[in-house]
Image (cartoon, helix red, strand yellow):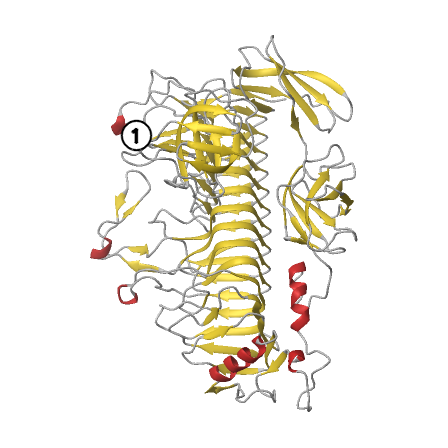
Amino acid sequence: MFSLHGSGFGAAPRIFLKALRAQKTVELAVKSAEDGTAVTQVPRSLVLDVYEVTVANGGATSAPARLNAPEAHHFDMPDAAPGTRLRVFGRNLYIGPLAPAAVFVDAASGAELKGVVTTSGSSPYALFVTPPAGVVAGRSYRVKVFNGYVWSAPSAATLLGRDRGPDPFAVGLPWAFDFAATAADGPGYKAGAAGAKKADHHVFNVKTDVALSVRAKGDGKANDAAAIQNAINLAAAYGGVVYLPPGVYDIGSASIDLKPGVVLRGYTAASSKIVYRATRPGFIIEPGSALTGFVDLTLQNQDASGATSNLSSYDQPFGKFIIQRVVWDLGTGGPISLKGDRIAILNSTFRQRVNYLTGDPAQRTGGIGPFRFASVTNVVLRNNTISWTTDQISFKDVTGALVENNRFVRSASDVIVAGPGQASWSWPFPYPPRPVAMGEKVSRVMGRQLSTNFVANLVIQNNAFSTSDGTILWNNNDGETILSEGGGPSPREEAGTIASVSGAQLLARPKCPGCGWRVYPGARLFVVSGAGAGQHRRVLSCDGDAFTLESPFDVAPAAGDRFSVAVPSLENAIIRNNTMSGNPFGVAMYHGAHLNVSVVANQLVDNGGIYLYPAQKAPSGAPREFNVALNIEINNNALRNTKGLFPSYVTVNFVMISENDFWGRSLYAIEARANQIVARKGTLALFSEEGFNHMTVYQNAGGGPFLGGSPSAMRGMVFQGDVCVNCPVAYRLNTGSVDTTIWNAVTSASAGSVSTFLSDLAIVPAVGKSKGTVVGKD
């Protein structure tokens, strides 16, 4: 089963499916249809192929749209070196059984070079490819993928060609080859020899190097800050490694200034240790630095004030930075703050206790989690164990992030006993909220595992997300395992009405007298009503009310149609093969625009569920906001509630926060297939009921009765092959659910549980329930 989105379908469209390899066309059975949506069924007898779908309305036939075609989105590294294998991420990249292929396209000349594809480990979402010998250093390349049936378009993301070289710190990324020039002494340097070439001196042993006027003791008693800093300063002249042999290096309250081109390296993390009690950041990365980092060390923050950070560049960018095989005890200090390009954090362990950074330790306020990635490109977080208590790991304004094979453990121990300072606090659910009682234990600050806002080209896979020290107390609106809640008011997201369109130029009606539109970098313009609804284009510039887009629309919107201009909170994101336990929520796409997101094959045990929750709001005196979600798949996830702590669900709802009618169309190409939910009787509904939910949440009761007269924000949702065990209600629909498909559903109830298959409610009786709902099996 699938749904089509477009316009001009008419009341009785005919839908045709053409197999490109077999060159065979069949007409499909239409299960439900309206002017902009049609639900249809593919016969089981058809073999795997790439298909072209066309719609005929009696007077015209549409241009074809493709199913199973490959899409190459981005890569697991920003550089391509001959013989160094990389991964292309996207959709439908390897669907078998036919052999895939890939070519590297020179972005300037268009010349194509064939890569070597490895099918072992490849999947529809990732294809292993080795760049060929012809890749030229300094040139940019896009990649096209052949999935055995058709070729993709060239990837929007590019790779920078470079020469292959040695990788002295085993980073596994081509940009780390640049460390090789200074990771060892050159031939012209010999310690203590007359006439030794200083430019070839790259490795400085802090205990023994004859070039050092002050040497470190490493006995855990002497203050070694001056010796280490002096060695760093000397190494910075030509780039190099400051080597700390086995020992304990106490640097007291000093901050270490890590200069450009210098790596701080120990013998092993078990034997080389730095302890510090800095009131400033323990370690400072100079702005504009490159080729720096920490390797084979233990770093321990012994400051007990809870008001210091651990690593900072004072919000200035740096690049080519590594943390490799490090044990870092952040103590009660704040985060490792990162900003810049080409950052790798690998094979390391990080611990952080309760902290009060940005708050008042005496009043027990504030606190920031262990990592902050802000304005970062090309970051890899792999094979680490990260445990913490306060707040979250934050990704914001990040492009190109791979979070893979990590273990994340959030402690539930940051609690307080409610007193007068918590008199205004409440338990959000069950609704209406119950005030927190004096003397109750409550979570002190909001916290979650990963926060991913305004992030593009993201992969989160094969990680374990768990909790420790009891159950997370959910008295704050938090607790997500993975959260994306971008959006917000101007300039990140606004919505308005079109005055005219000419080619790639769109003129908007003024949003208010004398005030023009403002567009944040990376924004897309989504058409949300009229014949062109569902189309989106990147915004190149905005001058007052005039938008310049990357290309003209395929179907030109008309004057009076509506649009949303937004920086997607997630774009080109894959969240797969992760395990999650103990968190009040699972994967949360809350408000904001979401584009091309795959949530697949995750295991959630005694963990909250998965939800997509776009919204509309038009607050008085503030910009209008209307969220769009496009190309979202929630497939093959397993959710099991064994303890009754948190509900298991897959929820795709639309929230009407203000206004009492649908302002536009929000959801396009959303599917939930082959998910399995095992519910538990009597579990409290936190945010969502157990089961599969697709409803309009009307929150504007004070603004008048719900109307629902205009076309719904939600059309064409597909639930297929999903299993719901012991769900009080397996599927919940209501007013605003239009052309929803529930196909091949499996429900069951164990002894003592009662399960209703479908609940379909009217928000107000006059408007009615869902429309065009298709329920069936084959």
| Amino acid bearing label 1 | Asn
The image quarter in which residue 508 lies: top left
**Relative horizontal placement of residue 297, taking residue 496 as reference (left or right):** right
**Relative horizontal placement of residue 659, taking residue 267 as reference (left or right):** left
User: In the image shown, does 109 or 689 lie closer to the viewer?
Assistant: 109
User: In the image shown, does 422 or 187 lie closer to the viewer?
Assistant: 187
The furthest residue to the top: 58
Above or below: residue 313 compared with residue 144: below
The furthest residue to the left: 420
Question: Residue at (51%, 15%) from the top-left corner?
Answer: 34
Residue 164 visible, this orientation: yes
For the residue labelled by badge 1, is the local secondary structure a helix, a strand or a loop? loop
Q: Position of residue 99 (x, y in %)?
A: 79, 39
**Relative horizontal placement of residue 351, taking residue 124 as reference (left or right):** left
Mark 1 surroundings within 10 Å by alpha-carbon count, few (fewer than 14), some (14 through 19), many (20 or more): some
Question: Residue at (75%, 45%) from the top-left corner?
Answer: 119
Q: Quadrant of the C terminus?
A: top right
User: In the image shown, does 243 or 341 lie closer to the viewer?
Assistant: 341
Question: Residue at (26%, 24%) from the top-left corner?
Answer: 704
Q: Position of residue 172 (x, y in %)?
A: 67, 60
Q: Quadrant of the N terminus?
A: top right
The image quarter in which residue 516 lies: top left
Q: Position of residue 392 (x, y in %)?
A: 43, 55
Residue 653 visible, this orientation: no
Q: Position of residue 145 (x, y in %)?
A: 71, 40
Question: Residue at (36%, 17%) from the top-left corner?
Answer: 767
User: In the image shown, does 625 or 477 lie closer to the viewer?
Assistant: 625
The residue under label 1 is 700
Above or below: residue 254 compared with residue 128: below
The image quarter in which residue 405 lies: bottom right
Above or below: residue 370 compared with residue 423: below
